[in-house]
């Protein structure tokens, strides 16, 4: 373990550096990124006796400055390897490192081979003790926070002032809830949060929203409309605030036309919906929807003036090569404002990971490639190469200019937002390197 210098009796404030590792360079799309809410929430529970700096590697270089007393690193799976590299550099200079976030929480013992400490779960319940231990030179390897068994989320507001001088699409990102009422086998959220689905008190959220100066606001909840009865007071309070917001939800909310109208009236301009598969074999498609198909629900949201981003995954066990054409036909039928495509990825901690591991279908554990854009497992009904190629081809097809204009024109309202959203997705979707791969007709896995 790194030698932790005792910091007691120092005249100046101890310094904490919080890092969001980057795995790739972004072009102009980089200007439309969101800041890490994870690190702003961690910073919010650091006592004022500490000085905190946020570093987003997507925007700035890590300088490996030795004046910090503790370095904290967050990581999704694809960021873990880069996070470990950064951790090791700091530790080699005698600076202790704590890691947190979804990947270290799921694989704490792996993370501990690169860091001094790991926070398993949320920072709020354990951060004060961790910092106290750091000052006393006795960091523990694991700080495990347990989730309360009530459904109220009590967290401080994130420290947005730490983002001063940085450029993002918006710094008005906010969380109204944590967790999700569903438990899809490919998703990390419910294994991580358990079945607890907690909302903040509406008054607290509305007060935070009223403190905003700009209009564009993004809810980073897993499923902001997951419990409509708890979402409604928030939405009603937002009517008339003048915010334009986006978020993520399950399509089931659209089964209630009244709720769709309220969501639009509250200022929602875009909603990201996990459709997952056009074959309808997973839980995210609406059940008991009173006869409405997913396509009808998508159209209902679109007609309310909300840009619906339909997220689809390729590679489920019932997907053969026909899934690509079937998905294109599905999208033609319901014409969501924008569509986004992912390669099925068995993230550690999920049921899917356990299944593929047991069946010997994981191709490797190179976490850098666990990012929904590469094939890391052996699909059941096609080769990994075919899956990758199909994913590239569908994206190329969906982001052709005529297809984009058709989606824009079929949106009765919010055409400018639909166009902007499509341009952004097109920019992020079709890299020159990927198009070259398609042209070469060979796809490396
Ligand atoms: C917002 C979000 C994003 C944003 C991130 C913006 C940003 N700059 O952070 C965007 C849209 C960019 C994004 C992208 C992706 N995402 Co995402 N995202 C989320 C989401 C919905 C919320 C994350 C969040 O901010 N939560 C709010 C904060 C406050 O909570 P938190 O992260 O849990 O942090 C707490 C603790 O974990 C802990 N903690 C976290 N970090 C640290 C660090 C330290 C030092 C300490 C002490 C504690 C600590 O303390 C925090 C406060 O309690 C999560 C789902 C989820 N619930 O985690 C998925 C999630 C993290 N994303 C996921 C994925 C897969 C992706 C993509 C790879 C998918 C894709 N292809 O589009 C991309 C990657 C893009 C890229 N190349 O970087 C997966 C990760 C799975 C995994 N094992 O890696 C998740 C879990 C979704 C899921 N359903 O499985 N994502």
Image (tube, grey):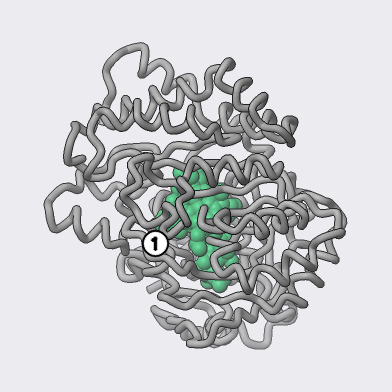
Residue at x-position 31% and y-position 59%: 185
Q: Is residue 27 above or below residue 180?
A: above
**Does residue 63 show up?**
no
**Which quadrant of the figure contains the N terminus?**
bottom left
Quarter occupied by residue 270: top right
The percent coordinates of residue 301 (x first, y second) are 62, 46
Residue at x-position 55% and y-position 56%: 255
Label 1 crowd (10 A; few <14 / some 14-19 / many >=20): many
Residue at x-position 19% and y-position 53%: 356
Quarter occupied by residue 17: bottom right
Camera-side residue of 47 and 258: 258
The percent coordinates of residue 250 (x first, y second) are 51, 56
Camera-side residue of 178 and 115: 178
The percent coordinates of residue 421 (x first, y second) are 65, 34
- Judged left or right of residue 160, residue 295 is left
Q: In the orientation shown, which residue stands out farthest toward the left?
A: 359
- Judged left or right of residue 403, residue 412 is right
**Residue under pointer 1:** 188
**Does residue 27 show up?**
yes
Camera-side residue of 210 and 76: 210
Mark 1 beta carbon near ligand 1 (under 8 Å): yes
Q: In the orientation shown, which residue stands out farthest toward the top?
A: 439
Q: Is residue 7 above or below residue 361?
A: below
Residue at x-position 45% and y-position 84%: 146
**Which quadrant of the figure contains the C terminus?**
top left
Q: Is residue 19 above or below residue 323?
A: below
Q: Number of numbered discs present?
A: 1
């Amino acid at each position: 373990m790194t030698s932790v210098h005792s910091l007691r009796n120092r005249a100046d404030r101890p310094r904490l550096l919080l890092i969001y590792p980057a795995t790739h360079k972004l072009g102009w799309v980089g200007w439309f990124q969101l800041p890490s809410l994870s690190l702003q929430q961690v910073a919010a529970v650091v006592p004022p006796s500490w000085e905190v700096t946020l570093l987003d590697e997507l925007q700035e270089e890590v300088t490996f400055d030795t004046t910090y007393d503790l370095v904290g690193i967050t990581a999704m799976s694809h960021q873990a390897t880069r996070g470990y590299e950064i951790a090791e550099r700091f530790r080699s200079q005698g600076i202790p490192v704590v890691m947190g976030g979804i990947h270290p929480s799921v694989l704490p013992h792996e993370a501990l081979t690169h860091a001094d400490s790991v926070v398993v779960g949320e920072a709020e319940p354990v951060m004060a003790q961790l910092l106290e231990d750091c000052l006393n030179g006795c960091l523990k390897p694991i700080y495990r926070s347990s989730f309360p068994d009530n459904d109220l989320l009590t967290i401080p507001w994130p420290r947005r002032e730490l983002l001063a001088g940085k450029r993002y699409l918006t710094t008005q990102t906010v969380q109204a809830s944590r967790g999700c009422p569903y438990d899809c086998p490919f998703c990390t959220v419910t294994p991580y949060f358990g079945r607890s689905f907690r909302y903040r008190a509406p008054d607290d959220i509305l007060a935070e929203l009223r403190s905003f100066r700009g209009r564009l606001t993004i809810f980073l909840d897993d499923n902001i409309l997951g419990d409509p009865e708890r979402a409604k007071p928030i939405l009603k309070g937002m009517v008339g605030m003048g915010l334009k917001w986006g978020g993520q939800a399950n399509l089931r909310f659209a089964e209630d036309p009244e709720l769709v109208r309220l969501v639009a009236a509250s200022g929602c301009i875009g909603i990201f919906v996990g459709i997952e598969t056009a074959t309808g074999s997973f839980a995210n498609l609406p059940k008991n929807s009173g006869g409405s198909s997913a396509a009808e629900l998508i159209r209902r949201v679109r007609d309310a003036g909300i840009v619906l981003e339909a997220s689809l995954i390729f590679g489920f066990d019932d997907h053969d090569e026909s899934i690509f054409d079937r998905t294109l036909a599905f999208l033609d039928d319901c014409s969501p404002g924008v569509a986004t495509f992912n390669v099925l990825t068995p993230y550690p901690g999920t049921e899917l990971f356990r299944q593929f591991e047991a069946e010997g279908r994981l191709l490797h554990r190179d976490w850098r490639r666990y990012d929904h854009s590469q094939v890391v497992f052996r699909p059941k009904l096609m080769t990994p190469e075919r899956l990758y190629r199909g994913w590239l081809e569908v994206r190329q097809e969906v982001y052709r200019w005529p297809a984009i204009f058709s989606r824009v024109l079929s949106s009765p309202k919010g055409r400018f937002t639909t166009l902007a959203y499509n341009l952004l997705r097109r920019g992020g979707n079709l890299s020159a390197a990927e198009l070259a791969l398609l042209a070469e007709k060979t796809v490396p896995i």
